[in-house]
Image (cartoon, coloured by chain):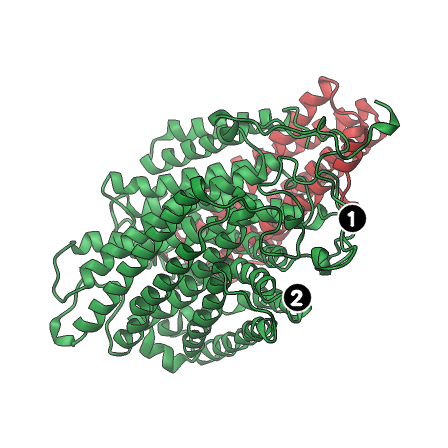
Amino acid sequence: MSEAVAAHYTSTGLDTRKIAFWTFIGSETLLFGTLITTYLLYEGRSVAGPTQHDILNIPLTSVSTFVLLMSSLAMVLGLAGVSEGNVKKARIWLAMTALLGLVFLGFQAYEFTHFVQEGLTITTSLFGSTFFTLTGCHGLHVAVGVIWLSTLLVQSFRGNLGSDKTTTVEIAGLYWHFVDVVWIVIFTLVYLIQRGGGA
Amino acid sequence: MTATDTTVTTHEYEVEAPHGIWSWITTTDHKRIGIMYGVSAFIFFLMGGLEALLIRAQLAQADNTLVSAETFNQLFTMHGTTMVFLAIMPLSAAFFNFIIPLQIGARDVAFPRLNAFSFWVFLLGGLFLNASFLVGSAPDGGWFGYANLSSMQYSPGRHFDFWALGLQILGIASLAAGFNFIATIINMRAPGMKLMRMPIFTWMSFVTQLIVVTVFPVITVALVFLTFDRLFGTTFYSVAAGGDLLLWQHLFWLFGHPEVYILILPTMGIISEVLPTFSRKPLFGYPVVVYSGALIAIIGWGVWGHHMFAVGMGALADSYFSAATMLIAIPTGVKIFNWIATMWGGQIRFHTPMLFAIGFVAMFIIGGMSGVMHASPPTDLQQTDTYFVVAHIHYVLFGGAILGLFAGMYYWWPKIFGRMLSEPLGKLHFWLTMIGMNLAFFPMHIIGLFGMPRRIYTYSPDLGLETLNLVSTVGAMIIGVATLVFVFNVFRTRRRGQPAGKNPWGGATLEWAISSPPPVYNFTVLPEVRSLTPLWTDNGVSEIPDHPPAPIHVPGGSYWPLLTAIGVLILFLGALTRIVWPAALGVAWTMFCVFKWAYEPFEV
C-alpha cells in the first residue's frame, strides 16, 4: 500500500499526535502557571475567613499526594503491558491507575467538604477563591484522566487495545504524568511552603 | 493492475470533489475550511466596519445625538472585539488553512477533524458574541474589559457575560488550531523541505501559533476568574476582599500584547511572499526575517507593561517595560529594511497585491513610529486614553494587518478560486482604501494630541476639533466605499474573472506548482523539495504530474466536529443563562461526541 506509506511519512520521524500533545502540555503549563501565580500573589492577603495556616492538612494531603504518585507508577506498568501485548497486565494496571486517580479525587472531595464546614467557600476570601479554583482545576484534570483511562479499558475489553495502540496509551500516559507533576508543584507551593499573613 | 500501468497521462485515479451543502458541513478538507473561515470572517469584518461607521457618524459633529451613550459603548466594544477576534485572526486562519499545507507540500493538516472543529467553534463563538445585540446587551466595557467595570456591581446586565464567555469560546478554537498547525508544520513538510527552506509565510504562521498556544491559556484563566466572579461571587477582582484590580490588567495585557503580534505576524508573512514575487527577486535576508520574527515573539512576551504606564507600576517596572518595548522595535525595523531591500533593484510589477504590500510597509512604518513613542512613559502619559493611541492602533492594525490581508486575498485569490480578480477594480479598491484610511486615521493623531479622550460618545464644540473629526468620518466612509468595490470585484470575478492557470504571478513556492483551484488531494505525488524557491530554481522540486499516477486516499469527512462544537456552545449557553441543566447537557454531549469522534474510523 504505497498511500499508507505516504500517509505515515513525517518530517521528523516522530508521531504527529505526540508532537501535538506535547504542544498541548506546553500550553497547559501556562494555564496552571497563571493559576498558581495568582494564588501566590494573593497569598496572605485575605481579609476574612480561615487562612491556609488554619485549615490546610499537610499529613492528610501527603497521603493523597502519595496515592497520585503511585498512580503514575501504575500508568507506566499499564503502558508496558500494552506495548508488550500483555492484555491482562495492561488491564490491571490501567484500572489501578484510574482507581488511584479516583482515590485522589475522593480525598479532594473530603477536603473540600471539610473546608466548607470550617467556613471556607469559594466566595469567602481571596484564599478561598484562588485555592478552590486552582485545586479544582487540577481535580478536573484528574477526573478527565480517569474518564480517558476508563475509555481505554472499555476498548481493551472490546479487544481494541493491542500493542498497535501503544502510542495512543502513551499519550494518555503523558497526560497523566503531566497532571501528576503539576500536583507536585501545587502541593509544594500551596501546602508545604506557606507564606504571609497570620503565621 | 500491472507495474507498467503507472503512466502519468491517465485520468483513472482522479478524485472528484464532493458536492452539496452536506459535503461542506462535514468537510475536513483544509481548503474548504479555509474558504469557510474566509467567508465568515469577512462577514464579521463587514459588521465590525458597520459599527465603526456608526461610531464615526456619531462623532462627525460636536454634541451629536445620533446614538446614545449606551449604544456608543456597545459599538466601540464590539468594533474592537469583532475586528481582533472575529475578523483579523480568522482571516489569517483562512490563509493558514488554505495555504500552509500547499506551501509545505502536504495533503492536509495533521488533524483534519480538529481543524473543522476549530472552525465551527469559531463560527458559533462569533454568533454567540453577536447574539448579544439581539437581546440588547452587547458588551460595553471596551475590548480589554477592565476590572472592575466588569464586576456584577458595575455591570449587572448580561453584557460582560456575553463578552467573557464569547472570548472563552473563541479561545478554544484558537488553541485547537494552534496545536494542529504546530504539529502540521513540524511534521508534515514534504521530503527535503528543511526548516530553513520553509516559505516565509509558513514560518511567520508557525511563530504566530507558538504565541497563540502560550498566551491563550493566560487569557483563559483571566476570563475564568471574571466569569467566576460574576457567576459564583468569587473575589478575584474584588477590592473589598483585598483583591487587586491590576491583576486583570496584568493578565489581560500579558495576553493582549502578544496578541497584537498574533494579528500582525501572519500578514508580515503574506507581504514577505508578495514583495519577492512582484520584484522578481528572492526575499532579501530570508534567515534574518525568520529570526527577527522569532525574536518579536520572544520579546513580545515581556513588554505588556507599556499598556499600563498610567497605573503607576513604579520606576523600576516602567524602566524595564520602556526598554523592552524600544528593543522590540529593532527586529521589526530589521524586517522593514529587508522588505525595502527586496524591492531594491527588482523588476517591480505594480499589480494589486503588490500595491497593498507596499501600502502595508508605508503605513506600518507610520504606525510603528507612533508605537515607539508610547515606549517612553512620560510621553505615554500624555497620549494614553486619547485618540493618539486610536490613530496608532489603526495604522498598525488597519494599515498593517488589514492591508496585508487584502494583499494576501488578491495574491492567492487565483489559486483559491481559479479566477483572477479584476486589476482595475483592485487598483480602485487600493487607492480608495489608502486615501480613506489616511483621512480617517491621520487626523486622530492631532485630535489626540489636543486632548480628546477615546471612548466618549460626544464632545463639546469648544474643543475646536469638529473639522478634524468630520475629516476622519469622511475618511471612514471612503473606506466603506472601497470595501464595497472589493465586494463587487469578488462577485464580478465569480462570473467574469479570467482563468488563472497554475502560476499567474510567477510565484516561487509550492502552491503555484499545482492547478488552480487545487485538486482535492493537493499534490498528485508527494513533492521532493530541493530549494527555498523551488519554482525559481532549476530542478528545485521533483516532477509533479498533472494527474495522479496512483490511487490517492482522501478522507470522507465527519459530522462529529460540528456536533462537538455544538456541545461546547450548549455548555456556554448554560453559563450565560445561569441554568444548570444546559451546562450539564453540554458537558455530557461534548464528552459523548469526543468519544464517538475518537473511535470513528477516519483514515487521513
Q: Is residue B489 left or right of residue B56?
A: right
Q: Name the spot of residue A196 as percent of width and height, x first.
A: 49, 63
Q: Is residue B276 above or below residue B495?
A: below
Residue situated in front as seen by the camera: B327 or B553: B553
Residue B257, can we see it? no
Using the numbered discs, state the Cα–Cα distance from disc 1 to disc 2 in whole angstroms: 20 Å
- Answer few, some or many: residues within 10 Å of disc 2's Cα (few below 14, many 20 plus, some between 14 and 19): some
Q: Which label is found at residue B345?
A: none
- Kindly identify which chain the residue marked by label 2 belongs to: B
Q: Which label is found at residue B282?
A: 2
**In the rendered image of this protein, which colour is used for chain A?**
red
Q: Which label is found at residue B542?
A: 1
SS at mark 1? loop
Residue situated in front as seen by the camera: A159 or A89: A159
Which amino acid, by three-letter code, is at mark 2? Pro
Q: Is residue A43 above or below residue B373?
A: above
SS at mark 2? loop
Which amino acid, by three-letter code, is at mark 1? Ser
